Amino acid sequence: MLEPDPTSRVPTAHAGAPPTPLGPHALQILTTEHWSLLAARSLVYAEAMSRTSIFVAALTGAVVSLALVAQVTDFGDGFVAFALVLLPVVYFLGVVTVVRLSQVNREDARWIQGMNRIRHAYLELAPELEPYFVTSRFDDRAGVLQSAMAMRGPPAPTQAFVAAPGIVAVVDSVVAGATAAVAAIGLDLGLAGALTLGGGLFVLSIAVFALWAARTIPKTAEQLDIMFPSPPAGS
């Protein structure tokens, strides 16, 4: 007798379990999609690093240029004019870098959510493998954080300054403060006036970045279409 076609069989979760609703080619399709999401995450990391490197390179070049101009002009009016032209451009580059890094993080969260869903499908096919998974199979915010950062709870408030957008925001705020201090020197406000104006603009810039992040991060979580929420704690 001829053996039945193996492609016509429906995969089961384990011996004796009822058939799963997934088709015969589900595992191959899920594996392909999983690798596609891994490739997308690699592109996300590459862009985040490249955008951050561009900002750091621009800032480094600006500092070197200001040092050279300062030696020639002895911190005179020419230095002030050059700094007030160059530093706002660097600050603008930092702002758009923070915005793009936020968009990149949003994309990365989406890809992690997709990988969590695929992991959920894996465990539907073979639920006995669950003890061997260290990442989450749930696609809500808690599941995404567990898979992305190995966190089982909400991140600390200081986490925003540890991530790449927070680091760039702090450095960019220093650029804003330096711009204000140079402007104060150009207006002959003295050292105290330069420090006061520079420190004030630094704090204002940090506050604006923090408020923007406080509005943007929750929107990212709200945009996640949840299909497999995490179970309540202790269940």
Image (cartoon, rainbow, N blue to C red):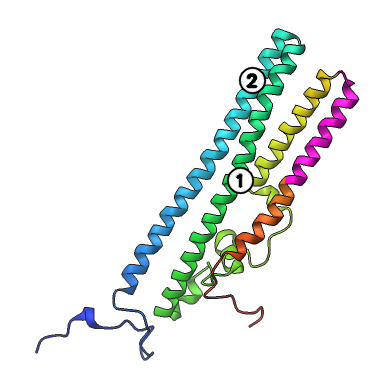
Location of residue 194 (image quadrant):
top right
Residue 108: horizontal and vertical position, in percent? 52, 56
Residue under the point 39% across and 79% down:
125
Residue 81: horizontal and vertical position, in percent? 72, 17
Q: Which label belongs to residue 64?
A: 2
Q: What segment is highlighted magenta in the picture? A: 188-208
- Main SS of the magenta part reads helix
Residue 49: horizontal and vertical position, in percent? 53, 42
- Whether 217 is drawn above or below 96: the answer is below
Task: Indicate left or right for 70 with 24 as reference.
Answer: right
Location of residue 171 (image quadrant):
top right
- Whether 194 is drawn above or below 24: the answer is above
The residue tagged with tag 1: helix, strand or loop? helix
Front-most of 26 and 184?
184
The residue tagged with tag 2: helix, strand or loop? helix
The N terminus, quarter of image: bottom left
- Whether 7 is drawn above or below 136: the answer is below
Q: Is residue 196 magenta?
A: yes
Front-most of 177 and 137?
177
The CA distance from mark 2 to mark 1 is: 26 Å
Residue 75 in view (yes/no): no
Mark 2 or 1 closer to N-term?
A: 2
Residue under the point 59% across and 59% down:
149
The C terminus, quarter of image: bottom right
- Kindly identify the amino acid type of the residue bearing the numbered disc 2: Val
Q: Which residue is mark 1?
A: 99
Q: Is residue 65 magenta?
A: no
| Number of residues whose C-alpha sits closer than 10 Å to that of mark 2, classed few (under 14), some (14–19) or many (20 or more) | few
- Kindly identify the amino acid type of the residue bearing the numbered disc 1: Val
Task: Indicate left or right for 207 with 60 as reference.
Answer: right
Residue under the point 37% across and 68% down:
30
- Whether 94 is drawn above or below 112: the answer is above
